[in-house]
Amino acid sequence: MTFTPRTWVVGEVVSAATMNQEIRDQFNSMFAAWTSYTPTWTSTGTAPVLNNGTILGRYMKIGRTVICHINMTSGTTTTYGTGNYNWSLPFQAANAGASIVGAAHLLGTARWVGGIVISPNALNCSAFLPKLATTDGRVDFMTATQPETLAANAQVRLTFVYEAAS
């Protein structure tokens, strides 16, 4: 993972180990495999429980830029709770003064394409998908019944890029 480079001092004798850490390792981290993490799925109401479903997050962090993907598949014993859904980020978002928008995709009984929103300083993201009862393009928070009633094997895919707080 990239980190803040050191400040070099005039006349400093540079060793191979220092060069490797400061230059080679920085570049290698930008070309390495993504890092896995387990996002937390929450809601603003009764908590959903994944049970025998699966959730996997993967990210690449270069400096403070985070590229992230979350893939969740509900299981036969998943309970969906109530309220608006959220998924945890691998790092807190920066207070950039603007919300970040990414891509959301729900594969249920139908396919739904929408967006995700990450607010300044956020620790999680929210999916917004088309409203089930409208044809005018409006979107709303994803819930257990919005845009459709979720059932076993429903897949949620979220992909986004954002600035981390540190």
Image (cartoon, rainbow, N blue to C red):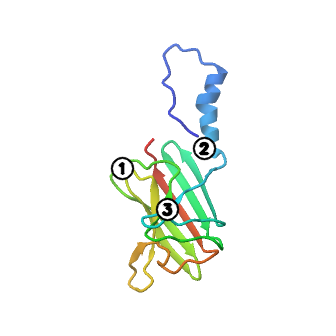
- The label on residue 42 is 3
Q: Nearer the viewer, mark 2 or mark 3?
A: 3
- The label on residue 106 is none
What distance separates the C-alpha of mark 1 from that of mark 2?
Answer: 23 Å
Measuring 57% from the left and 59% from the top, which residue is drawn there? 69
Q: Residue furthest left?
A: 97
What distance separates the C-alpha of mark 3 from that of mark 1?
Answer: 24 Å
Measuring 50% from the left and 66% from the top, which residue is drawn there? 103
Instruction: In this rendered view, identify the residue nearer to me: 136 or 41.
Output: 41
- The label on residue 30 is 2
Q: Is residue 15 above or below residue 99?
A: above
Mark 2 Cα-neighbour bin, 10 Å: few <14, some 14–19, many ≥20: some
Instruction: In this rendered view, identify the residue nearer to me: 41 or 37.
Output: 41
Mark 1 Cα-neighbour bin, 10 Å: few <14, some 14–19, many ≥20: some
Q: In this view, does 118 lie above or below 63?
A: below
Q: Which amino acid, mark 1? A: Ala
Instruction: In this rendered view, identify the residue nearer to me: 12 or 2.
Output: 2
Q: Which amino acid, mark 3? A: Thr
Left or right of 51 in this view: 10: left
Q: Where is residue 6 in the image (x, y as percent from the top left)?
A: 51, 26
- The N terminus: image quadrant: top right
Q: Which of marks 3 and 1 is in front?
A: 3
The residue identified by callout 1 is 96
Q: What element carries label 3?
A: strand
Label 2 near label 1: C-beta < 8 Å?
no
Q: Where is residue 149 in the image (x, y as percent from the top left)?
A: 52, 80
Which is more N-terminal, label 3 or label 2? 2
Q: What element carries label 2?
A: helix
Left or right of 3 in this view: 51: right
Which is more N-terminal, label 2 or label 1? 2
